Image (cartoon, helix red, strand yellow):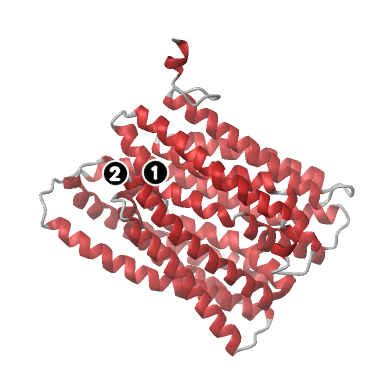
Amino acid sequence: MSAFMKGTLLLVVATFMGECVEFIANMVLAKELGEHGLGLYMQILPTIFLIIMLASFEMPVSISKFIAEKDARYHQSMLQHVIKLTIIFTSVLLAAVTIILPYISTFDTYHPLLRWLVILLIPMISFSSIARGYFMGKQQMSKIASTQLVRKLVQLGLLVFLFQLFEFQTDTAILIAFCTFVGSEFVIVLYLIHTFFIQYHELKRRPREALPNQEVRKSLMAVSIPTTGLRIFHSLTHAVQPFIIKMALVHAGVSEQAATEQFGMLTGVAMTIGFFPAFIGHSLLIMLIPTVSKAYAIGDFNRLQRLLQQVLKGTALYGIPAMLVCYFFAEPLTSMFFESSVASGYLQILWPYFLLHFFVIPMQAYLIGLGLMKDAFYHTVWSSIIQFTIMYVLGSLRDFQMEGVLIGLNTGALLLTLMHYITICKKIGISHFSLKKLAEENH
C-alpha cells in the first residue's frame, strides 16, 4: 500500500471517529440550547471561524506545500523565518482585533466574555498552524489525525460535564459551549507546539542550508495570500448567509424568530447530518496538497492523472451511498436532534449540495497543489454571487420561502464543482469526459 493510501486511511479512520464525537456533541448542544439557542449559536459561528481563519493565515497549507517541494536541508531555515513572521503577524492581528471587536454589533446579543474568548484563540491558532503545516508537509499524518480526534473528545467531555453539573440561561449556555471549544483547542496547541519543537531541534543537528528571508516570504505568500483570500471570502459568505436567509424569509412573511429557528434547523441539523461524510474529503485534502504539489513540481503528470481518477472514484463510492441514506432515512436521522419534519425535508432537498461538495473538497486541494489558488478564488466568487442571488430572490417569494434558499444552495454547489473540474482537467491536459490524456485520444 502506498504512503498516500496509508496516510489517507489513517486520517479517514481518525476523522470518522472525530466526526462521530462531534455528531454527539451537536446533539448535546441541540438538547441544551434548544431551537432558538442553537440558531443563535450557529449564527455567530461563521464570524468566529472567520477570525480563526485570519489567525492561521493559511500557514498549514503554504508550509506543507513548501516542505513537500523543497529538499530537507532547507526546512530548518524556512521554519526560522516562519516563526519570526508569525510573531509579527500575530501581534498586529491581536492589536487590530482587540480594537475592532467591541464595535462588531453581531456580538452584542451574546455574553460579553465571548469577545475575549475569540481574542484568546488568535495566538493559539497562529502558532499551532506552523506545527500543523510542518507535519502535513512531512506527511506525519498520525499527529494530525490524533490531534483532531483528541480535540473533539475533550470538547465533548467538557460539554457533558458542565451541562450535567450546572444549569445555564441561554446566553451563558452559548458562552459555555464556546469555552469548551477554546479549552479543547488549548490542549491540542500544547501538544503540537511541544512535538514541533522536538523535531525542530533535531533539524538543527542535520545538514542544512540557509534560505534568504525574501525567498521564503515570497514562496509562502504566493500560496497564503490567495488561499487566505479564498477562505476570507468563503468565511464572509458564511457569516453573511444567515442574515441573507433571514432577510429573505422575513420578506416572504416569516417572523424573525421563526426564521432564526429555521436557520438553526438548516445548519445545526440538516447540514450537520449531510456533511457528516465529508470527513473523508477533508482527509483527502490534507494528503493531496503535499502529494499533488510534489508531483507537479517534478512534472509527473501521469501520477496527477491517476490520482485524480482515484480521488473522483473514491468520492463517488462513499458520497452516493451516503446521500441515499440521508434521503431515505432523513426523518429518523433528524429526529435524533429534534422531532421535526422540517429538518428532514431540508436534508432531502439538499442531497445534491452535499454530494457536490464532497467532490469540491479534494478538487480544491488539487487546485492549491497545482498553484491555481486564484482560479479557486474566482470560482468561489462567481458561484457565491449566483447562489446568493437565487437564495434571496426565490427565498423572498411566499410560494418558495426556505425551498427557494435550498435551490440557491444546490445551484451554487453545481457551478463551483463544474468550474473546479474543468480547470483541473485543462491544467493537467486530460479530457473532461474520459479523464485520459488529450494526446492519447488524438491517436
Q: Does residue 88 appear in this view?
A: no
| Vertical arrangement, residue 161 with respect to residue 49, above or below | below
The answer to whether residue 303 is left or right of residue 410 is left
Residue 359 in which image quadrant: top right
The picture quadrant where one finds residue 141 is bottom left
Check the image and report above or below for 113 versus 202. Answer: below
Give left or right: position of 122 versus 410: left
Residue 112 appears left or right of 297: right
Determine which quarter of the picture holds residue 298: top left
- Could you tell me residue 129's position as x and y percent? 37, 58
Q: Where is residue 227 in the image (x, y as percent from the top left)?
A: 45, 44
**Residue that appears at 32% across and 35% down:** 295
Residue 175 vertical placement versus 357 (above, below): below
Q: Residue at 51% of width from left, 38% of height from top?
A: 312
Residue type, mark 1 in image = Ile
Tag 1 residue: 289
Specify the farthest residue to the front. 1
Kindly identify which residue carries mark 2: 68
Label 1 or label 2, whichever comes before in sequence order = 2
Q: Could you say whether the residue bearing mark 2 is in a helix, strand or loop?
A: helix
Instruction: Give the image location of residue 395, x and y in percent.
Output: 80, 48
- In front: 361, or 309? 309
Q: Residues within 10 Å of mark 1 (few under 14, many from 20)?
A: many
Query: Disc 1 versus disc 2: distance between alpha carbons?
Result: 9 Å
User: Could you say whether the residue bearing mark 1 is in a helix, strand or loop?
Assistant: helix
Residue type, numbered disc 2: Ala
**Does residue 148 sit above or below 77 in this rendering?**
below
Q: Which of 64 and 303 is in front in this view?
A: 303
Tell which of 221 and 345 is nearer to you: 345
- Mark 2 and mark 1 in contact (Cβ < 8 Å)? yes
Q: Quadrant of the C terminus?
A: top left
